Amino acid sequence: MTFSEHILKWYGQHKRELPWRTTKDPYKIWLSEIMLQQTRVAQGMPYYHKFLEAFPEVYHLANAEEEKVLKLWQGLGYYSRARNLHATAKMVVEKYNGSFPNTYKELKKLKGVGDYTASAIASICFDEPEPVVDGNVYRVLSRYFGVDLPINSTQGIKYFKELAGEVMYIENIRDYNQGIMEFGAIQCAPKKPYCLHCPLNKSCVALKENRVMELPVKINKTKIKNRYFNYLVFTDANGNTLLEQRKGKGIWQNLYQFPLLEAKKMLNLEELTEQINGQNGFPKMESLILYNKEPLVHKLSHQHLHTQFWILETADGLKEGISWDEITTFPVPVLIADFIKTYKI
């Protein structure tokens, strides 16, 4: 039995019952693929159902307000995925009359659709013989064939794509591609692979050479940047607060937050007061207290946000104040959402 036949047989016996596996609708497949980038299936599943309930077809998503899309996405992280999702839906409606392209080459032209996503949609929906290479596939191939090329190097990316194409099962590419990804997620897992009961254990190079936990190899290119956030939670006697929308191309673009003062280090009460007094446009405050005694460290892929929430009671009513009950309708980063849940005005 060949490598690909083992994968197909295993998939038939062990595959999880997931909603996007019962359809060939490219809209639903695309939605699931975008959501599951950088996200576990268990976390992404409720979002998948929420999005389909709100936007049953690509037309509904294309015509939605961005704020609604971001609000539904809230908590999934990597918000550029949500913005790309919205932009792609518009593109499919405007350029392709609401029908997704049916080839890998055309799918790659869609915003936010790279090699992996285009390959997945083309093979699963349209039976195009395109190999998929995601993190799970890298792991399976590198371990089974004993390949120690870094998976995030130019040479490694090219090599594994070619290797995936050589071993794929063309006659049933839909199940094979889903199978090898599932195999990597469950059987050939990152930290606790089930090598003892693996159907490929007799011919796995990494197992034979006792290198399972060494593969795949990845070059560590990420430098963590520390940032220091001070959120100013203004409150007035009417139970109102202030929100602002993040602009620019940085993290959380177009999401809402409390007014922010970013500093080069953690600030104490005196330092923050000095900074606030040096800013124009802030309401006059009666009191200022720190809500969280220890900074909350919110970890993103390339940066750690050391965050303090400051409660500022104002002497006057907030002119552009938003009711505390109303702020839950705004799309906000999960860091802000968690604070809103715990703080009682």
Image: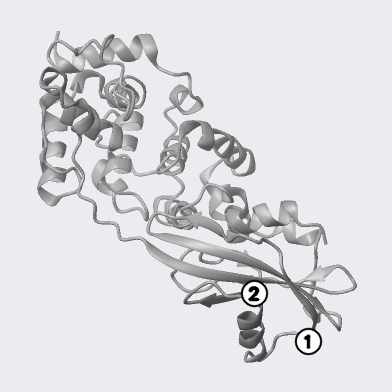
Which residue is under mark 1?
A: 284
> Label 1 neighbourhood size at 10 Å, few (<14), some (14-19), many (20+)?
some
Q: CA distance from mark 2 to mark 1?
A: 14 Å
Label 2, secondary structure: give it: loop
**Residue 250 image point, x, y percent:** 44, 68
**Residue 67 image point, x, y percent:** 62, 60
Choose between 43 and 80: the one closer to the eye: 43
Residue 210 appears in the rendering: yes
For residue 139, what is the image quadrant?
top left
Which residue is under mark 2?
A: 259
Left or right: 6 as drawn, with respect to 85: left
Residue at the (19%, 13%) spot, across then down:
201
Q: Amino acid at mark 1?
A: Lys
| Viewer-side label of 2, 1 | 1
Q: Amino acid at mark 2?
A: Pro
Left or right: 37 as drawn, with respect to 283: left
Question: In the figure, 206 relative to 345: above or below?
Answer: above
Question: In the figure, 157 relative to 264: above or below?
Answer: above
Classify the position of the C terminus by image quarter.
bottom right
> Label 2 neighbourhood size at 10 Å, few (<14), some (14-19), many (20+)?
some
Label 1, secondary structure: give it: loop
**Residue 23 image point, x, y percent:** 45, 26
Choose between 7 and 264: the one closer to the eye: 264
